[in-house]
Image (spheres, rainbow, N blue to C red):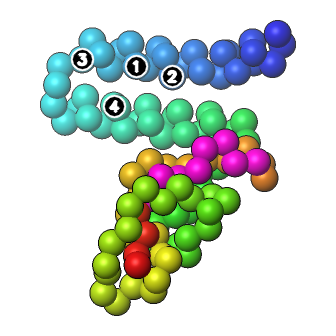
Amino acid sequence: LFTKGELLKALLPILDNFERASAAPAGEEYKAGMEMIVRQFEKALGDMGLSEIEAENAPFDPELHNAVMREDAEDVETETVTQVFQKGYRLGDRVLRPAMVKIAN
């Protein structure tokens, strides 16, 4: 229960900013506000130990990547990630979600 409470406490300022952003008119200020919220959320998750799995242009690794498509790509090594459809994340050494990717034939 304590761990959940600490997690929720860390996420509440982000919820506050989402509420402020949803009340703002659309436009450049809204977009800038949403980008700030994304950075704030990424920082909060990073502070809890979450890290993004590097995928773009990386060698395919079935432990870290879920290849859902292949493509013939010139000037790219075989089995190299050419596109990321969904980012992957890990907590310490544990993969929480592999990156969903396209790889070169």
Marks 2/4: CA–CA distance: 11 Å
Q: Looking at the image, which residue is at 57% across and 15% down?
A: 12
Tell me the tag on residue 33.
Answer: 4
Name the residue located 43 percent from the left edge and 56 percent from the top edge. Answer: 68
Q: Which residue is mark 1?
A: 18
Q: Earlier in the sequence, mark 2 or mark 4?
A: 2
Mark nearer the N terminus (2 vs 3) = 2
Residue where numbered disc 3 is placed: 24
> Which is nearer the eye, 66 or 90?
66
Is the C-beta separation of discs 4 and 3 under 8 Å?
A: yes
The x and y percentages for residue 72 are 31, 78
Spot the residue most to the bottom: 75
Dot 1 amino acid type? Phe
Mark 4: amino acid: Gly
- Per the model, the C-alpha gap separating discs 4 and 3 is 9 Å
Q: CA distance from mark 1 to mark 2?
A: 6 Å
The answer to whether 72 is drawn above or below residue 26 in the figure is below
Marks 1/3 in contact by CB < 8 Å: the verdict is no
Amino acid, disc 2: Ile
In this picture, residue 24 sits left or right of residue 51:
left
Residue under circle 2?
Answer: 14
The residues colored magenta run 94-101
Instruction: Please tell me which of labels 1 and 3 falls first in the chain.
Output: 1
Is label 4 in a helix, a strand or a loop?
Answer: helix
* Mark 2 element type: helix
